[in-house]
């Protein structure tokens, strides 16, 4: 199979140069021309893809060579870009910045090479003139395999400033494909973990994306950029497919007994009624097993998720239903398993706490032995409390805000058998939080972190697997298969 989707990688010398503004603006501007635009983000970031999705009307997808492996970058790209006229890939940090101590691994440069895609460098020109040529020349010549094929100048102060920048870059051999003036209206608010997600400010986010698109339309040569994208080299190989990935994963060993720490106080273990199979999923003598219903947390408090997770669960035979812990007072009817990803429960702690009926429903499900996969925000939601605000009380831990940012890739191995993985399963993950849970690990920890420091973290308790670690299940599709089988048999 040959992949020939026109594509661009939008990179920068450093964070804060304007990649998100330019990439999102380009996506929206091209989409407004009637093109089907596929949005992608290098690295583990969950927030930028939300703006990308708003700009294009398509799911924003991540390309992370550390979490998924280099061999999955092109297949995952092809999966997301299937049927599209153009793909725009927003980079991470500086062009050559990747996983600490791992060389080029997970850098924008590496992903650009794996995709055989031209790179457009976004340069914050606010405090320089002729020096911009030296900067661009350095980035363009550092790695001959990286094709830095154009520059977009950002935060240009005046017409005279633009003229000086263009004159300097004439000598570099790298064409200027855009020049954007300072524009406060495209700024997006940020807080302790970066930009505020789209789900929390949808109306304002729509306006911001349109402002980005308008600025890009005024300042960039869209025809030249599209021509550059069409010159991307062909890729060979098949697109990633969730069903094929699940089918090729090893079958999970069954049955799996109740695992982990000693059971909680029986006074807090209400008996869990047998869930009713939803209409349309009953086995009517056909020999087919009904699809277990798996509830996935969403809404403004839980915005961090990779699209491939739901696709893998569906491919493994589950019915995936989204619910909002801020609004829904009960889990979806017939829920047999629960996935609670990342987000900002610390921001919405009072509202989450006030929804006592749902907190009790989650606790009932978990104490009844149903599989629950919780990452970061999910871990906090299952705790006793966040800064004194009562949560679900599934885990005997307390969470609080911290001044310290915990950030970075992690090399980990499953310590305890769980609904997600057999002990010894190796996965790579990412941590990104300003909260602390005490204690940090249970009697049966979820993960042993191998790098950058050796430690155990997280909790395996009955069917619950809770941890700060964000993982990408495309790297281990057997995780989804095992989880769905546990939902069928719990």
Image (cartoon, rainbow, N blue to C red):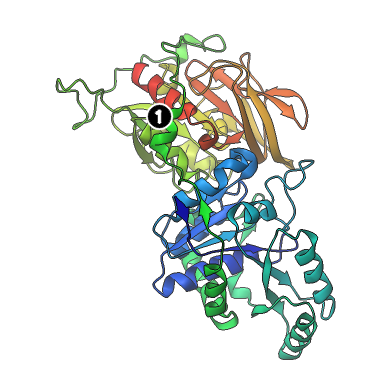
**x and y percentages locating residue 190 in the rendered image:** 63, 58
Q: Is residue 287 left or right of 425 when viewed as pictured?
A: left
Disc 1 target residue = 247
Q: Residue at x 85, y 76 (%)?
A: 131
- Nearer-the-camera pick, 265 or 6: 6
Residue 402, visible in the rendered structure: yes
Examine the rendered structure and indicate whether residue 334 appears above or below residue 9. above
Examine the rendered structure and indicate whether residue 221 appears above or below residue 351. below
Q: Is residue 95 left or right of 472 when viewed as pictured?
A: right
- Nearer-the-camera pick, 348 or 472: 472
Badge 1 element: helix
- Nearer-the-camera pick, 395 or 275: 275
> Can you tell which quarter of the image residue 149 is in?
bottom right
Examine the rendered structure and indicate whether residue 154 appears above or below residue 77. below
Q: Which residue is drawn at 37% across and 31% down?
A: 294
**x and y percentages locating residue 14 in the rendered image:** 75, 60
The quadrant of the picture occupied by the C terminus is top left
Q: Residue at x 76, y 83 (%)?
A: 170
Q: How many labels does the image show?
A: 1
> Can you tell which quarter of the image residue 17 is in?
bottom right
- Nearer-the-camera pick, 432 or 393: 432
Examine the rendered structure and indicate whether residue 102 appears above or below residue 169. above
> Can you tell which quarter of the image residue 84 is in?
bottom left
Residue 202, visible in the rendered structure: no
CA neighbours of label 1 inside 10 A, class few (<14), some (14 to 19), many (20+): some
**x and y percentages locating residue 304 in the rendered image:** 53, 44
- Residue sitting farthest toward the bottom: 160
């Amino acid at each position: 199979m040959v992949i020939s989707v026109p594509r661009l990688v939008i990179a920068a010398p450093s964070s804060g140069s304007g990649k998100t503004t330019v990439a999102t603006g380009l996506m929206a501007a091209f989409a407004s021309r009637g093109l089907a635009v596929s949005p992608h983000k290098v690295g583990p970031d969950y927030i930028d893809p939300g703006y990308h999705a708003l700009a294009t009307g398509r799911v924003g997808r991540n390309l992370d060579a550390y979490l998924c492996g280099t061999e999955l970058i092109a297949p995952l790209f092809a999966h997301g870009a299937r049927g599209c006229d153009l793909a725009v890939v927003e980079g991470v940090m500086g062009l050559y910045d990747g996983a600490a101590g791992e060389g080029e691994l997970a850098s924008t440069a590496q992903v650009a090479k794996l995709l055989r895609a031209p790179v457009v460098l976004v340069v914050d020109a606010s405090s320089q003139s002729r020096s911009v040529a030296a900067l661009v020349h350095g980035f363009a010549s550092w790695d001959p395999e990286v094709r830095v094929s154009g520059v977009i100048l950002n935060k240009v102060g005046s017409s005279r400033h633009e003229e000086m920048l263009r004159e300097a870059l004439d000598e570099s051999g790298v064409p200027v494909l855009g020049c954007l003036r300072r524009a406060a209206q495209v700024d997006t608010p940020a807080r302790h973990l970066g930009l505020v997600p789209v789900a929390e400010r949808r109306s304002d986010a729509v306006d911001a994306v349109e402002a980005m698109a308008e600025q890009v339309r005024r300042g960039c040569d869209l025809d030249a950029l599209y021509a550059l994208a069409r010159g991307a080299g062909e890729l060979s190989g098949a697109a990633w497919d969730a069903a094929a990935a699940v089918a090729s994963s090893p079958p999970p060993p069954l049955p799996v007994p109740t695992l982990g720490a000693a059971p909680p106080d029986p006074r807090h273990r209400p008996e869990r009624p047998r869930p009713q199979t939803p209409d349309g999923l009953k086995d009517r003598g056909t020999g087919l097993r009904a699809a277990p219903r798996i509830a996935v947390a969403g809404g403004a408090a839980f915005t961090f998720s990779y699209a491939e997770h739901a696709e893998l669960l569906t491919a493994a035979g589950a019915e995936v239903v989204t619910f909002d812990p801020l609004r829904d007072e009960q889990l979806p009817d017939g829920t047999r398993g629960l996935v609670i990803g990342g987000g900002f429960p610390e921001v919405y702690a009072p509202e989450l706490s006030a929804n006592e009926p749902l907190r009790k429903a989650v606790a009932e499900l978990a104490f009844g032995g149903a599989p629950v996969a919780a990452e970061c925000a999910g871990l906090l939601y299952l705790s006793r409390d966040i800064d004194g605000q009562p949560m679900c009380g599934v885990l005997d831990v307390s969470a609080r805000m911290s001044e310290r940012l915990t950030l970075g890739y992690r090399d980990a191995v499953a310590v305890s058998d769980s609904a997600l993985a057999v002990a010894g399963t190796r996965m790579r993950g990412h941590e990104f939080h300003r909260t602390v849970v005490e204690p940090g690990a249970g009697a049966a920890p979820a993960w042993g972190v191998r790098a950058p420091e050796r430690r155990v973290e997280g909790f395996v308790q009955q069917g619950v697997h809770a941890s700060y670690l964000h993982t990408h299940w495309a790297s281990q599709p057997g995780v989804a298969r095992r989880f769905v089988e546990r939902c069928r048999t719990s």
